[in-house]
Image (spheres, rainbow, N blue to C red):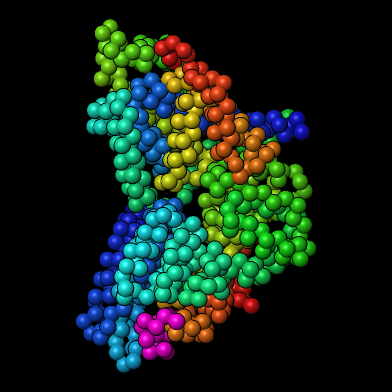
């Protein structure tokens, strides 16, 4: 705990310094150093997502630099990161993005996993000639539209994830009638629009959809609406803190379903109450770090622990959000023979399939088409399956 | 339907009890002593973490609750001696200083506790069925504890010599000093007591909900609403306002929309202040408590 806390602090305060040091170890032999921008919520309530994501990004650049960099047009190129903290706030995210954009040599920017600060920063990036690689859900609404040509989202859209998640969850849990309970946010409306028809197509009745105030901690009144309605499952989201509260309060109130489908986050909320619930299915948008036995994942876990000094936690899998994409970007630079022709780099990234820890590829619009893992807790037994991107 | 209404009412009383515990602390420090301490919410958060560490270390909830109160009382005492005694009744000063304290405590907490949410096991798990109604056992316990705490606190203010001194200072600080009340000592004690209540609220809150370094704003906002709603300086007012707010939120979320939960509190506040400009238990004279 103490070590984790210390490294967390170090990462939050000195993320840029860390990578700068990593970059300078090889700079002496490099012909060129390319500066990459990074905006993440290193502090604030969203840092649970962005901190591991930023560490994964730093780790990938560190690995490239450690091997001497990449070769672009015969020149050795290494990377240096300029990192800004969005503090989980949209206004601070805009300031952070502005600071990054003040550096004329920065043409590629990574970061931001949550839609509030993400949309604020991305709106600015969409008006600039930079390649922006982000992870937040509402980035999907910018892709394929004017200003979104140089944007890439590294996580599958809900539409893509739902295609495999819904049938798998319905099959595993055997649910016939479920209720949906989500925070009252824009993203929740799009989640319902995406998942509800697929659930109904899978033969599941969805008689109740309820939205709650995002800062809610006491779910008793809203859960009463689902009580004794003959439901056999609940579709919940969108983060671990909220879902853990819902699962816990569901077990306390009684008269509520004990099977859950979780959109977003990790398996932690269900696993904690595994003796009190019957089933819990969750999306692992990158890789299952806890229960999977993929050798590539095991290797990545060791490297992550060595790089950050942190143990693997339920949120660590966000560290893989940008990790493979960094190698794709580096490969694209080598292919097109340029480190600043961002249009060509984006085009090259969108036309390749990369077999990294994740299997990554992007659509022409910049939407991820990656395979995902689906975690399952059923009657106390935990497992995960890999769902194809198609 | 009747059962549903009773269940919803009880849910409201349970959450309202938590709000009342926070509000009593704010009423003491702000309503009675006139010290504007916006870092009270951070005391609630730190109290929750103290309880969390005690429970996860295996010392149990009851010891966690006791130490949360003790630790926050000590922290409150230190803060009063080091900072707040220099800005008594200076609301701008209190606001500025407490905003600084919020930033320091919140960022240190995020750095050392991590931003991840945490829960600890409550002493009572699962639900209980009473007369065909279903309740959370831990929520019932929290409600009982809140009633014990606020009743004890009220009796302390009404029946003890120190309580009378606190009330005297709330009514007229100079007058209290003239009749021999050691205002400096009493102020420090009040700050410690208010902080202990925040610690208790944190421990009780943590036994029901997730703890994070950023959890303070909700309890703080509601605490101040209740202090005003109940009538500045009125402990029974703050407690009754707490229960009313809990019930309003509970009924609003159950029968109207859960998306607007915090809004019900503000509607209640506006309506109450239109009808009772000095709050529910505010008096036109100077008598408080």
The residue located at (38%, 20%) in the rendering is B32
The answer to whether residue A201 is magenta is no
Residue lying at the far left of the rendered structure: A28
The residue located at (72%, 50%) in the rendering is A208
In the rendered view, would you say B249 is above or below A234?
Answer: above
Residue in the foreground of this view, choosing between A350 and A373: A350
**In the picture, residue A225 is in which quadrant?**
top right
The reply to whether residue A81 is visible in this rendering is yes
> In the shown orientation, is residue B202 left or right of residue B73?
right
The reply to whether residue A291 is visible in this rendering is no
The boundaries of the magenta stretch are: A327-343
The residue located at (40%, 59%) in the rendering is A94
x, y percentage for residue B47?
A: 40, 37
**In the picture, residue A250 is in which quadrant?**
top right
In the rendered view, would you say B261 is above or below B14?
Answer: below
Secondary structure that dominates the magenta span: helix
Residue in the foreground of this view, choosing between A86 and A147: A147
> In the shown orientation, is residue A129 left or right of residue A239?
left
Q: The C terminus of chain A appears in which quarter of the rendering?
A: bottom right
The answer to whether residue A332 is magenta is yes
In the rendered view, would you say A54 is above or below B165?
Answer: below
x, y percentage for residue A353?
A: 52, 84
Residue lying at the far top of the rendered structure: B179
Residue lying at the far bottom of the rendered structure: A74
Residue in the foreground of this view, choosing between B151 and B101: B101
The residue located at (51%, 85%) in the rendering is A352
**In the picture, residue B289 is in which quadrant?**
top left
């Amino acid at each position: 705990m103490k070590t984790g806390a210390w490294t967390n602090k170090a990462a939050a305060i000195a993320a840029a310094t860390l990578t700068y040091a990593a970059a300078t170890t090889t700079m002496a032999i490099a012909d060129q150093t390319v500066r990459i921008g990074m905006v993440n919520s290193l502090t604030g309530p969203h840092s649970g997502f962005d901190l591991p994501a930023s560490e994964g990004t730093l780790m990938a650049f560190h690995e490239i630099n450690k091997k001497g960099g990449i070769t672009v047009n015969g020149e050795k190129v290494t990377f240096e990161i300029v990192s800004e903290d969005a503090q989980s706030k949209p206004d601070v995210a805009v300031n952070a993005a502005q600071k990054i954009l003040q550096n004329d040599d920065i043409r590629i920017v990574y970061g931001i996993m949550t839609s509030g600060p993400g949309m604020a920063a991305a709106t600015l990036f969409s008006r600039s000639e930079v390649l922006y690689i982000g992870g937040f859900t509402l980035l999907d609404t910018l892709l394929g539209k004017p200003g979104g040509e140089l944007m890439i989202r590294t996580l599958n859209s809900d539409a893509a994830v739902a295609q495999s998640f819904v049938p798998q969850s319905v099959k595993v849990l055997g649910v016939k009638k479920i209720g949906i309970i989500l925070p009252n946010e824009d993203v929740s409306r799009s989640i319902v629009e995406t998942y509800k028809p697929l659930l109904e197509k899978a033969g599941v009745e969805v008689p109740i959809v309820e939205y709650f105030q995002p800062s809610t901690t006491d779910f008793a009144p809203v859960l009463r609406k689902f009580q004794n309605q003959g439901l056999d499952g609940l579709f919940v989201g969108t983060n671990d803190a909220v879902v853990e509260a819902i699962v816990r309060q569901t077990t306390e109130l009684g008269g509520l379903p004990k099977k859950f489908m979780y959109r977003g986050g990790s398996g932690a909320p269900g696993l904690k109450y595994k003796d009190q619930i019957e089933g819990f299915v969750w999306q692992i948008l990158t890789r299952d770090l806890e229960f999977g036995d993929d050798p590539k994942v095991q290797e990545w876990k060791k490297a992550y622990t060595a790089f950050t000094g942190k143990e693997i936690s339920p949120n660590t899998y966000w560290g893989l959000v940008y990790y493979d994409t960094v190698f794709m970007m580096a490969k694209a630079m080598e292919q097109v023979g340029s480190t600043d022709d961002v249009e060509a780099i984006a085009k090259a990234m969108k036309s390749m399939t990369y077999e990294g820890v994740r299997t990554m590829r992007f659509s022409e619009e910049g939407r991820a088409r990656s395979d995902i893992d689906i975690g399952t807790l059923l009657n106390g037994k935990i497992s995960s399956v890999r769902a194809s991107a198609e | 339907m009747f059962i549903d209404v009773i269940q919803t009412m009880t849910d409201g009383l349970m959450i309202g009890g938590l709000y009342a515990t926070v509000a009593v602390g704010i009423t003491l420090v702000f309503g009675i002593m006139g010290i504007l301490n916006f870092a009270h919410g951070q005391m609630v958060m730190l109290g929750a973490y103290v309880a969390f560490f005690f429970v996860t270390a295996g010392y149990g909830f009851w010891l966690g609750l006791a130490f949360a109160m003790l630790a926050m009382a000590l922290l409150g005492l230190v803060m009063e001696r080091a900072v707040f005694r220099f800005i008594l009744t200076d609301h701008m000063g209190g606001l500025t200083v407490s905003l600084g304290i919020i930033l320091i405590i919140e960022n240190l907490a995020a750095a050392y506790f991590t931003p991840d949410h945490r829960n600890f096991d409550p002493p009572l798990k699962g639900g209980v069925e009473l007369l065909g109604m279903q309740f959370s056992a831990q929520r019932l316990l929290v409600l009982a504890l809140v009633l014990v705490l606020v009743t004890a606190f009220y009796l302390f203010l009404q029946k003890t010599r120190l309580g009378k001194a606190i009330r005297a200072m709330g009514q007229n600080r100079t007058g209290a000093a003239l009749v021999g009340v050691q205002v400096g000592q009493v102020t420090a004690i009040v700050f410690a007591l208010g902080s202990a209540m925040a610690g208790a609220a944190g421990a009780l809150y943590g036994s029901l909900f997730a703890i994070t370094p950023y959890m303070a704003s909700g309890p703080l906002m509601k605490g101040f609403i209740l202090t005003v709603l109940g009538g500045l300086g009125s402990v029974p007012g703050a407690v009754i306002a707490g229960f009313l707010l809990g019930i309003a939120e509970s009924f609003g979320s159950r029968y109207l929309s859960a998306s607007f939960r915090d809004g019900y509190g503000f509607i209640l506040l506006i309506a109450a202040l239109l009808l009772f400009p000095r709050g529910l238990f505010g008096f036109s004279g100077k008598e408080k408590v």
